[in-house]
Image (cartoon, rainbow, N blue to C red):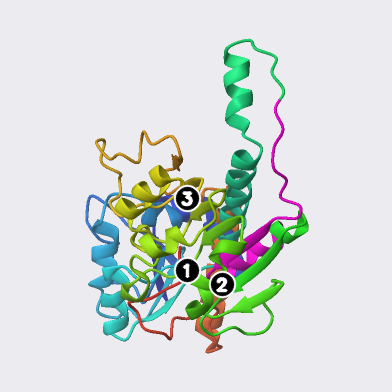
Amino acid sequence: MRVQVSADARARWGDRIQAAVPGVDLVAFDPDLGAIPGDPPEVGWLSVDVLRGDDTAFVDALVASAPLRFVQSAGAGTDGVTFRRLLARGVRLCTAHVNNVPIAEYVLRAVLDRFQRADRWREGQAAHRWAHHEWREVAGSAWLVIGVGAIGAAVAERARALGATVIGVRRTPTGTEPVDAMIGPEAVIDHLGDVDVVVCALPGGPATEHLVDAAFLAAMRPDAVLVNVARGSVVDEAALLDALDAGRPDFAVLDVVATEPLPPDSPLWDHPKVVVTPHSSSGGHGRFARGADLFADNLRRYRAGEPLRHEVVADPHVGDAR
């Protein structure tokens, strides 16, 4: 069984994968050839370096492989054109929920930074000014987590560990979500005025485009914080800027935006109530090993004819955020 991987993935994780799946032929993609040497692959691994890179040659060559039967992605999203092409061909596709840990840590850090007004400490240090200020606690706060998949669940667990009450939003809850209450998407607008923090961790796609619109923002509390780690399309950015200028919500943290990279002339860069990060909330080092272990396990399962973990069976136009 020939498996197309990147040269970096084979160098870093090849021994671990081959130890779990003895005899598998891990072949590194050759960017000079635009292919892997020899016969085309039956399996491909879209590792983190492939998904994050700008070179599309690896993906194009993989998708074009006639014997391709199974692809493992390092991300959780399936709303890209590559995934639609694979699924349309009948290729088995598995996603990875290995980014929930760093994304959840990112969300907690972002909220704590705003609640504690850490910017004032940084400004004071830069000015050599010893100035005390008081700040909000996460303990006793209320959070609304929209999308309680792997990422939203990890956010909820950590927020509750700090003493927050969490309301989860999910279209089809399982009953095992780590939240204090669960509501459906239709009830979100009725709860926005009751929460201190709103976290968007839901799928991208037509059904969720501009979910956070003018009406949504107007229903939020004036002291609320909005965090988007889902897709940029979820937030109407023009409406967000107007709402922030009008005084509600208090602040927005955006790890994703509608146009990426964010254009240099975007008003989001300089708005005093916005923090923009370059789609980096998943950047924890631990995701590499977790992704390699997941791929090794699914490769073993694929060869043994066993069910695959996180296999995509839903509409390919919609997938969990990252």
Pick the quarter of the image with the C terminus: bottom left
From the image, tell me which residue sits under label 2.
Answer: 149
Q: Nearer the viewer, mark 3 or mark 2?
A: 3
Q: Which of the 4 image quadrants contains residue 167?
A: bottom right
Looking at the image, do the residues carrying marks 1 and 3 touch, with CB atoms under 8 Å apart?
Answer: no
The answer to whether one can see residue 18 in this image is: no
Pick the quarter of the image with the N terminus: bottom left
Residue at left offset 35%, top offset 47%: 241
Helix, strand or loop at mark 1? loop
The disc placed on residue 248 is 3
User: Per the image, is 144 magenta?
Assistant: yes
Looking at the image, do the residues carrying marks 1 and 2 touch, with CB atoms under 8 Å apart?
Answer: yes
- Give neighbour class at mark 3: few <14, some 14-19, many 20+ (Cα, 10 Å): many
From the image, tell me which residue sits under label 1.
Answer: 202
189 or 168, which lies in front?
Answer: 189
Residue type at mark 1 is Leu
Real-space Cα separation, disc 1 to disc 3, in angstroms:
22 Å
Horizontal arrangement in the rendering, residue 129 relative to residue 225 (left or right):
right
Q: Position of residue 276 (x, y in %)?
A: 42, 42
Q: Which of the 4 image quadrants contains residue 145?
A: bottom right
Q: Nearer the viewer, mark 1 or mark 2?
A: 1
118 or 213, which lies in front?
Answer: 213
Real-space Cα separation, disc 3 to disc 2, in angstroms:
27 Å
The answer to whether one can see residue 127 in this image is: yes
Q: Which residues are magenta?
A: 133-158
Q: Position of residue 39 (x, y in %)?
A: 28, 71
Residue at left offset 62%, top offset 44%: 109
Residue at left offset 54%, top offset 64%: 192
Q: Is residue 158 above or below residue 244?
A: below
Q: Position of residue 152 (x, y in %)?
A: 58, 66
Say which label, 1 or 2, has the lower sequence index: 2
